[in-house]
Amino acid sequence: MARAEGRTPFLRTVRTLVWRDLVSEYRSREVVIGGIVFALLTLVIFNFAIDLRLETVEEVAPGILWIGFAFAGMLAFGRSFAAERERGTLDGLLLAPIDRSAIYLARTVTNSVLMAVVELVSLPVFVALYNVRAAWLDLLLTTALGTIGFTGAGTLVAAIAANTRAREVLLPLLLLPLTVPVLIASVKATAMALGARPPEPLPWLQLLLGFDVIVVATSFLVFEYILDE
Amino acid sequence: MQRLHPPASSVRPAAGLFADRPGLGLALLAMLSMGAALYAALLYAPTERLQGDVQRIFYFHVPLAWTSYLAFFVVFVASAAYLAKRAPVLDAVARSSAEVGLLFTTMMLITGSLWARPIWGTWWSWDARLTTTLLLWFIYVGYLMLRASVEDEEKAARYAAVIGIVGAVDIPIIHQSVVWWRSLHPESVVLASGGPAMPASMLSALVISLVAFTVLYVVLVLLRTRLELARADLRSLRRRALERLA
């Protein structure tokens, strides 16, 4: 983290990196399109696995939604470092005189944006397919907080898993136990946004916010040890 | 190969498992205290009136839980210290403690299930403490799998340290989320913990067992750490040997 002369300011570095990642994704569009189709497919497949002609569909449906988001997210995180490796651009990034933690922050922002696009497309389809009524503001707030937490941990774990032999297995294996609080809180708060009783989403939103802050801060601090080649 | 003399500097004389006095002393202490714990738990402590002999599993279950949490705390501290100092011995301690902790967590889950079946009438309940422990188990299974799938020793140590730190920071949040998940759940069954206050003889049996398991933990981590360091020595000796032959 030693600051050398002539370094670009931290936030500008992050902005440049986010722009770079988004442009690269815009050109291929493989993560977003893949993620959207995957999330929608999850909604359809679970409809066969669980009979949803229930009175309490708003209690069950959020779980399915978040499984879709989590798996679509893991596909995206896995891609983000694997693609760098294939193109050999990670070495260039590491040679640049920038803080390693800027790379973490930028990648977390990019991954959150990509997940948000996937979610914004999936949510209306979810509401229609599962025939639920949504309080949209609550639903969007929950989704945003859940996404930041899941991506914050996911970006860190993906950076580690990308350098191992069993990366496709290790990413979900390490990430899912760590993000259990996000999954529980998001599912609960989403259910309440769909009208589940009792309507007390506040503790869950606080839990999500706490997780986001603690996990992003911890990952930010330890990230430099991962890319320390 | 025959002409080869080991470089004196890198050979640790205490690399053998019980090769020194403190190591041997601790191992003997572990053996004696485990014997005392067995006696206290199975013969000395009175039979519980309601649960019968099944309750005696408590004298092993609780110390296993305590040493598991101790082990993962040691992983956390050793991981942070490793990233700061980069001393291989710190990484060896973290790894050893994770392995012993995982073993003890597994035994805690099994002994808990064995007790729960006759007392609660079920092998498993999604109670907050059980669920947290199960997730803890998964985190450290992942930790050890991560170590196994990185070739480079130094890289494996760094990655594992990061997971060791993030995992430990996450545990309180996991616990909190699981507690709320259960208590806010409408069908939650409140399992009364504790029950009647313990008579002194039960308490002393528990304390003896706690001491015994803690000593056992220390001995196992010590042996495992030495094994790890001996392996590292062997690797560097091999490397030197190959260099000389070349």
Image (cartoon, rainbow, N blue to C red):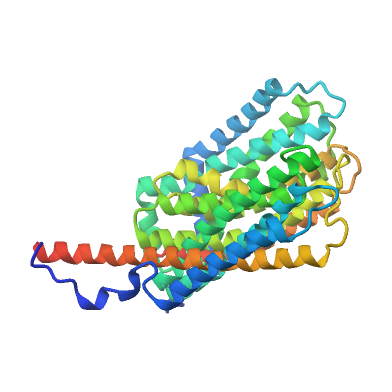
Query: Does residue A227 appear to the left or right of B106 in the view shown?
Result: left
Q: Please say whether residue B169 is visible from this viewpoint.
A: no
Please determine whether, in this image, residue B120 is positioned above or below residue B230: above
User: Looking at the image, can residue B33 be seen?
Assistant: yes
Instruction: Identify the image quadrant of the C terminus of chain A.
Output: bottom left
Q: Nearer the viewer, residue B46 or B205?
A: B46
Question: In front here: A93 or B27?
Answer: B27
Left/right of residue B8 with respect to residue B16 in the rendered view = left
Camera-nearest residue between B193 and B98: B193
- Name above or below for residue B126 compared with residue A3: above
Q: Position of residue A191 (x, y in %)?
A: 81, 39
Residue A54: % across, % down: 84, 24
Residue in view at x 47 percent, y 41 percent? A168
Q: How far across and how far down the image is residue A125, in percent?
A: 72, 29
Residue at the spot x=34%, y=57% of the render? B152
Q: Is residue B48 left or right of residue B173?
A: right
Please name the residue shown 39% across and 53% down the image.
B150
Please give the name of the residue rendered at 11% of the width and 66% of the height, measured from the top-left corner. Answer: B244
| Residue that extends furthest to the front in the rendered view of this protein | B43
- Given residues A178 and A88, the one toward you in this image is A178
Residue B41: horizontal and vertical position, in percent?
A: 69, 58
Q: Is residue B108 above or below residue A26?
A: below
Quarter of the image where one finds residue A167: top left
On screen, A193 above or below B216? above
